[in-house]
């Protein structure tokens, strides 16, 4: 349901962001979510930025926005005192004094298909895009046994709670007819059969898959929809990669191009001062891997999937040697690779919440300059 402005709370805005990029997808080191402020306050407007600086807070005040939405959190490590001795402490003080909430979606929005790296793919015109490094050990299987007449209701409930999604398909399940037996004790009130007597019931075994972080929500929905007072169900860990979540993306150019032409396209698209790259391999570019931010840790994945080029930021000198003549590394800078993340937030919120003031920050927070 699209909310109308006038009664939009900060928690309503957060709900839409986290439905798109659940905080459960963040990396362990990260600090995402509402970092400063009260989620119950009404939202006067949202200012979207990549980084939170003192200039950004001032801009929020000037534009009457009491919510700042950022990609990078203002603090990753714990803070023991707030005395205004550094920029982070001054930002927190200024935000609190002006009743401005600060929210960050960092590695969780890196980890969704249409997030940071997905936007890079869109800007480069890539097609047939897939997650470069899908999340592992993130899926579970739910098996539940339901009387025939209630199978549709239980299936629909668990689907609505988020289960049954495989790639671009939803409502996925496998169903087997069988016979369930049970005998209720003296304190039971069985839905079918009589307590004290063994009962056989025609049942359907429903199997479906879901992300681990949705377990509580899906099980709660299943139990609420199930007619039995004691629901028989099993949950199994899966070793399948979760292809809908993970870091980086890989796709293809519609038409292969020369390496120099591709780097020219990259430089123009991301408006970079320079592109640091490995030596040309004198072969056409067709398959392209990308990762917003610091993506050097994904080089092995890009090589294994036979990408011609890997576009990311923050490669160290010695890491360029790891290309080993197999791939062209194109380091465009951290800020440059993530700059369009602001558009991800903007497009999401303007679509989901009508007549609500959402602004892109005019402050260039890139601390790296090119001479």
Image (tube, rainbow, N blue to C red):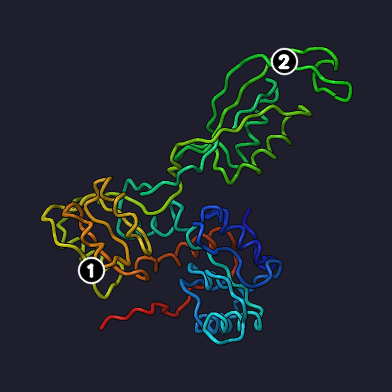
Residue 271 visible somewhere in the drawing: yes
The quadrant of the picture occupied by the C terminus is bottom left
Q: Is mark 2 on a helix, strand or loop?
A: strand
Q: Which residue is drawn at 47% across and 74% down?
A: 51
Tell me residue 370's x, y (percent): 28, 80
232 is higher (above) or lower (below) than 340:
above
Q: In terms of depth relative to the viewer, which is nearer, 56 or 143?
A: 143
Q: Which residue is drawn at 45% across and 54% down?
A: 111
Tell me residue 116's x, y (percent): 42, 60
Tell me residue 81's x, y (percent): 62, 80
Residue at the spot of label 2: 181
CA distance separating discs 1 and 2: 67 Å
Is residue 122 shown left or right of residue 320? right
73 is higher (above) or lower (below) than 328:
below
Q: Earlier in the sequence, mark 1 or mark 2?
A: 2
Snapshot quadrant of residue 276: bottom left
Is residue 26 shown left or right of residue 280? right
Crowding at mark 1 (Cα within 10 Å: few <14, some 14-19, many 20+): some
Task: Assess whether mark 2 and mark 1 are in contact (beta carbons under 8 angstroms).
Answer: no
Q: Which residue is drawn at 19% across and 53% down?
A: 285
Residue 254 visible somewhere in the drawing: no
Tell me residue 121's x, y (percent): 34, 56
Residue 276 image label: 1
Q: Is mark 1 on a helix, strand or loop?
A: strand
Q: In terms of depth relative to the viewer, which is nearer, 321 or 330?
A: 321
250 is higher (above) or lower (below) than 226:
below
Q: In terms of depth relative to the viewer, which is nearer, 49 or 142?
A: 142
């Amino acid at each position: 349901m699209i909310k109308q402005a006038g009664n939009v709370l900060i928690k309503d805005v957060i709900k839409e962001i986290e439905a798109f990029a659940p905080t459960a997808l963040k990396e362990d080191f990260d600090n995402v979510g509402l970092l400063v402020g009260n989620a119950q306050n009404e939202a006067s407007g949202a200012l979207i930025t990549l980084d939170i600086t003192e200039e950004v807070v001032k801009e929020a005040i000037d534009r009457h926005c009491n919510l700042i939405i950022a990609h990078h959190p203002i603090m990753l490590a714990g803070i023991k005192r707030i005395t205004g001795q550094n920029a982070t402490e001054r930002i927190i003080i200024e935000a609190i004094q002006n009743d401005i909430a600060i929210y960050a979606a960092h590695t969780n929005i890196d980890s969704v298909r249409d997030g940071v790296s997905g936007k890079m793919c869109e800007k480069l015109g890539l097609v047939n895009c897939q997650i470069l490094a899908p999340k592992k050990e993130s899926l579970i299987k739910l098996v539940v046994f339901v009387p025939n007449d209630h199978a549709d209701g239980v299936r629909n409930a668990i689907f609505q709670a988020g289960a049954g999604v495989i790639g671009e398909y939803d409502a996925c399940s496998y169903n087997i007819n069988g016979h369930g037996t049970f005998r209720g004790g003296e304190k039971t009130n069985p839905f079918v059969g009589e307590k004290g007597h063994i009962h056989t019931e025609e049942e359907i075994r429903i199997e479906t898959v879901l992300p681990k972080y949705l377990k509580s929500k899906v099980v709660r929905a299943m139990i609420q929809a199930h007619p039995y007072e004691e629901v028989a169900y099993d949950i199994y860990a899966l070793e399948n990669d979760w292809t809908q979540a993970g870091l980086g993306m890989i796709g293809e150019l519609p038409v292969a191009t020369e390496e120099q032409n591709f780097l020219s396209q990259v430089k123009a698209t991301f408006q970079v001062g320079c592109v640091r790259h490995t030596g040309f391999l004198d072969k056409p570019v067709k398959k392209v891997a990308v990762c917003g931010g610091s993506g050097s840790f994904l080089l092995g994945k890009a090589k294994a999937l036979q990408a011609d080029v890997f576009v990311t930021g923050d490669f160290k000198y010695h890491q360029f040697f790891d290309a080993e003549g197999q791939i062209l590394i194109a380091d465009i800078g951290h800020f440059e690779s993530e700059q369009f993340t602001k558009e991800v937030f903007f497009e999401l919120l303007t679509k989901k919440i009508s007549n609500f003031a959402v602004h892109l920050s005019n402050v260039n927070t890139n601390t790296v300059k090119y001479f």
